[in-house]
Image (tube, rainbow, N blue to C red):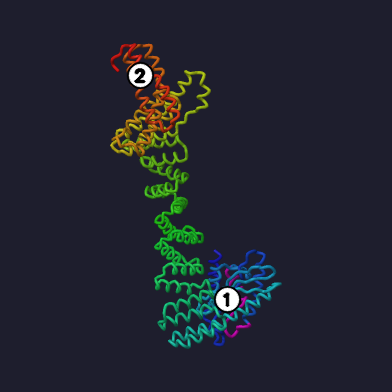
Amino acid sequence: MRTARLVVGLVLVLAPAAPAQVAPQQPAERLVVLPLAVKTPADSGLSIAIMDAARERLAGLARYKVTVVAKPKLCEALKASDFACDVLLDESQALLLARFMNANAYTTGTLDRSGGSLVASIRVRDIGSSGYAALFSVTSGNPGTPAALGEAIAQRLNSVVRAGEQARECNDQRQKSQFNKALDAARKALVIEPNLAAAHICMATVYEAQRMPLDSQLVAYQRAAKGDSLNATAWENVARLYQQKGDTLKAIDAFIHELQGEPQNLQLRLGIAELLRQQKQYQRAVALLDDGLAKSQGDQRMLDLKARICIEGELWRCVLDGFVAVVKNDTTRLGDSAFIKAALGAAQQLADTEQLLYFSHAAVRHFPKSAAFWKTLGAAFDAKGQRDSSIWAYRQSVALDPSDVGASLLVAKAIVDGAMYDTAQAGKLKADTAALHAYRNAFADKLDTARNYVAKAVSSPDTALRLNAAVILLTGGSKIGQAQAYDRARPWLEQTLQLVAPRAPADTVGPRQQIRVQASFWYGVSLFQMLPPAYQAMVKSKNCNDAKDVNDRIARTKEALLAGARVSPSFVNTLLTNLAKFEEQMPKVRQAFKCKNF
């Protein structure tokens, strides 16, 4: 609003003066000298005093070469725009003021303290072909006083004004194709101000007109940039020359220097970011756009280009942060399934469980009939360790699409992975065998619900699904075995071994073999632990069918233990030693029972 008032006020102040004719004896160039920005508000008055002194002194030194806009005129314009006379303007306000005062150039800069000295960094901005563009620092010495520093600034500005006159002469002669005279004028300017950007730029344009090599022009523009490191014209031409030479990376660096002098130049920023994207320098492009977004939040063109670059460069954190920012500005985007899928994909790439859960919740809220989104929500809960919620979400997915065998396996896996046997509680029930048996059965019952979801995968022709089913069955069976509910573990482990049965004698390596070894171990342990009760029952019954069953069980136990021995060799050896005792008794049992069926 204050900038807007500045525009209105300047129009009111300057409008009446429009018809006035500039007196012939007055210099054509107009310069606005403004206070410097300060780090602390306490130095504001000091800055104003310094630049007031510099303005007044420069007006006397260069009265025949430039019109230095006097303070009363500045105050008149500022007050008309509801500003105080003594005010520190930002860059945009300073430019606006200079333009409405028909100035060809204006000053900006900063004021700092260094020990007992005052240091002014001055930039002269050329907005009307004045030739004054410059960047320099001036110190007052120690002790520093406003008058001393103002004098030093005025002397240096006077030098720039004198050199600028010759730079303008260079341009006039160049336009007349008087190239030698133009170069002579440029050299005179450089004698006065060796780093004057306008003089070097004029020399470069002369070299171009003379069709001199690109390197000659390039060196001249680089010298101009050295004198004014924020000079947009110099850096623009350095960049273009590098592009002609085919050096895109150096051209990009030059464009970035140009942007430092014109940070509000959105088109330039977008162009540089696009060049960086083409060179696959995605991180630099994103950093450049982030800097722009910090100055112009919510700019859609920058946001769109950033999103494209992040996705193309697989900068998933950047991609995800972009989706989050979009939702903050427009929650209706959560109703766009394509947007949701892309956001979920980025969250999955980063394993960002918080955002995965957030976007998954949003997905099922907006698309409750999507089995895929329910499955993703289940995965998000699973990643957060929220097993019960994970199982619930996976079950919703299966209910919506019963043919999705993969989703069924996810339910089974979540149930099995989430089941934990409380050994401490089991220890408390050790003296009460009935209660302990019931506790173990309850644990097995909970796990058994998973087998229903494994069934379709077991019969699937897809070997990957069958292998995943085998892993789930092995995990569930081993957990039940560890809970010592051996009779309940046996069907899990038998089904596991059926799924990974050797396809050929050479089928002894790979994941199937690893599952086979683990399942054999737990199957052998379970069978062994179930053997003594079966043997005792057989002895009491004196039944040959029971005897054959025990004999077969001994054989299966031995085979399983030998197949799984590598899991725990010493433990298996102990079991095999005990198993041998049962094995030794079976011929005697057959003879005593007069059995002929084994």
Q: Magenta span covers which residues?
A: 60-81
The amino acid marked with disc number 1 is Val
Q: Which mark is residue 148?
A: none
Which numbered tag is attached to residue 32?
1
Residues under numbered marks 1 and 2 in contact, where contact means CB atoms less than 8 Å apart: no
Residue shown at 60% from the left, 71% from the top: 121
Name the N-terminal-most of marks 1 and 2.
1
Residue under label 2, please give it.
550
Judge by depth and name the residue closer to the eye, 192 or 78. Answer: 192
Q: Nearer the viewer, residue 128 or 591?
A: 591
The quadrant holding residue 398 is top left
Q: Quadrant of residue 457?
A: top left
Residue 461 colored magenta?
Answer: no
Pick the quarter of the image with the N terminus.
Answer: bottom right
**The C terminus sits in image quarter:** top left
Residue closest to the eye, 470 or 97: 470
Placement of 440 over or under 418, stated as above or below = above
State the image coordinates of residue 267 (x, y, percent, origin top left). 44, 66
Q: Where is residue 374, by image quadrant?
A: top left
**Residue 215 seen in the figure:** yes
Point out the frontmost of discs 1 and 2. 2
**Between 160 and 89, which is closer to the camera in this rendering?**
160
**Mark 2, secondary structure of its residue:** helix
Q: Is residue 85 above or below residue 529?
A: below
